[in-house]
Image (tube, helix red, strand yellow):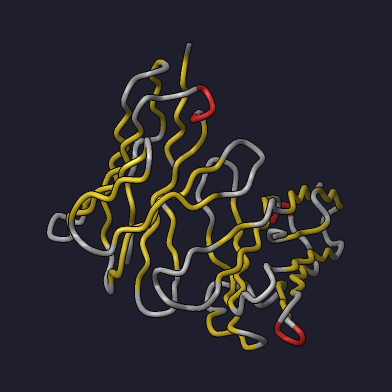
Amino acid sequence: EAGVVQSPRYKIIEKKQPVAFWCNPISGHNTLYWYRQNLGQGPELLIRYENEEAVDDSQLPKDRFSAERLKGVDSTLKIQPAELGDSAVYLCASSVGLAEQDEQFFGPGTRLTVL
Amino acid sequence: GQSLEQPSEVTAVEGAIVQINCTYQTSGFYGLSWYQQHDGGAPTFLSYNALDGLEETGRFSSFLSRSDSYGYLLLQELQMKDSASYFCAVTRAAGNKLTFGGGTRVLVKP
């Protein structure tokens, strides 16, 4: 069974440029998460989706970040414009549902470098 | 607010036992999870404790004391491949929302 797929794996852009990350969750997983992981720190949740509905976007910086999950499968996270402080690994995860014991499966992440 | 504390780094030799402690302060606690992450890799799930006590899965065990807001991950018979970062994470409120600690980097030496 394929895991969570993310692309691109690496992205280098100049500040003020836009960037987008794509995630394909595990088939059948209704819940999708986007996390940001700064170097030497744990992942921080940005947004959670239950099917196509964002159930928690309280930690998403909405002035420059946006996300969508059309048709409740693939998801895209966008930053526009990017700032130097956005350099981080952006992780996508999925789980069967929102039950507390549902294991979250993580993708390999997109490493973003903003110059 | 909420916080999780775990040691930043632990070094041990092959075959040894390592215990990674995690203390947390949070409201609406549901359970404590542990994830392993190798450099450049994805976090992978190791264990989840919702009730007090010890959960054993092969060489790894996880413990939770809800009254003490404390848990630990025990790594036994350490192998070189266990060199990685280990994160504790609390599930708080409904909806499988994880809040991660800063991670403990485990270095296994020959």
Residue B104 against residue A59 in the figure, above or below: above
Instruction: Please say if B64 is above or below A46.
Output: above
Up-down: is B88 above or below A102?
A: above
Q: Is residue B18 left or right of residue B99?
A: left
Label tally? 0
In the picture, measured across the screen, residue A8 lies left or right of residue B60, that is: right
Residue at the image position 70 percent from the left and 84 percent from the top: A72
- Identify the residue at horizontal 54%, vertical 50% (top origin): B44
- Considering the image in quadrants, where does the N terminus of chain B appear? bottom left
Residue found farthest to the left: B67
Rendered location of residue A51, percent (x, y): 63, 85
Q: Residue at x 28, y 50 (%)?
A: B55
Q: Position of residue A18 (x, y in %)?
A: 85, 65
* Res. A60 image quadrant: bottom right
Query: Which is more toward the observer, A38 or B48?
Result: B48
User: Residue B82's x, y, as percent?
Assistant: 49, 30
